Image: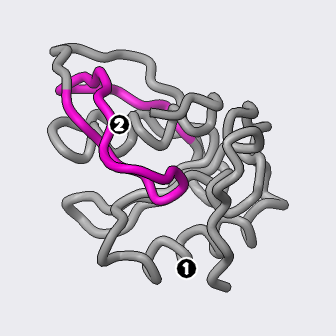
Amino acid sequence: MIRELMHDPIFLAQKAEAATEADASVAADLLDTLTAHKEACVGMAANMIGEKKKIICFLSENGYMTMLNPEIIKSEGVYFTEEGCLSLLGGPRKTKRFKKIKVRYQTLDMKMRIQSFEGYTAQIIQHEVDHLHGILI
């Protein structure tokens, strides 16, 4: 189900709670909402649809991907860039990112995975993980 986007900076600044198997419908709604906004958005965190759960969806080289409880466990190659966000009004904002990251996360069936990402996909993941920690660019 496509959900309304959350724009309240006070809500968005709150830290998300761990996701469980019971949050599968939240993950499905998040992916539906992301694909509905595919012209303007490449990633979303659950708090962007009003859910304080550690779930992100994003477009990768291999299509859309969903992660539960993602944690960046390694990063290298710092750089500075500008990013926009559907949840925030105004134009792009400056932020620090890493060229390569390693992420530990759970799949929708709660299997633990560790995967490395680089380039634009790594940047998207970092943006969405920041959302889970209440960090707004």
Q: Which mark is residue 128?
A: none
Tell me what residue is drawn at x 62 percent, y 37 percent: 132
Query: What secondary structure do most residues of the magenta stretch adopt?
Result: strand
- Sequence order check, earlier mark of 1 and 2: 1
Query: Which region shows up in magenta?
Result: 81-105
| Quadrant, the N terminus | bottom right
Q: Which mark is residue 32?
A: 1
Front: mark 1 or 2: 1
Tag 2: Cα neighbours inside 10 Å, few (<14), some, or many (≥20)? few
Q: Which residue is identified by label 2? A: 115
**Residue 10 location, x and y as percent?**
75, 38
Q: Nearer the viewer, residue 133 or 11?
A: 11
Tell me what residue is drawn at x 39 percent, y 41 percent: 125
Q: Amino acid at mark 2?
A: Gln
Relative side of 97 to 22, left or right:
left
**Residue 136 location, x and y as percent?**
53, 34
Instruction: Inspect the magenta stretch and tell me whether residue 125 lies in it.
Output: no
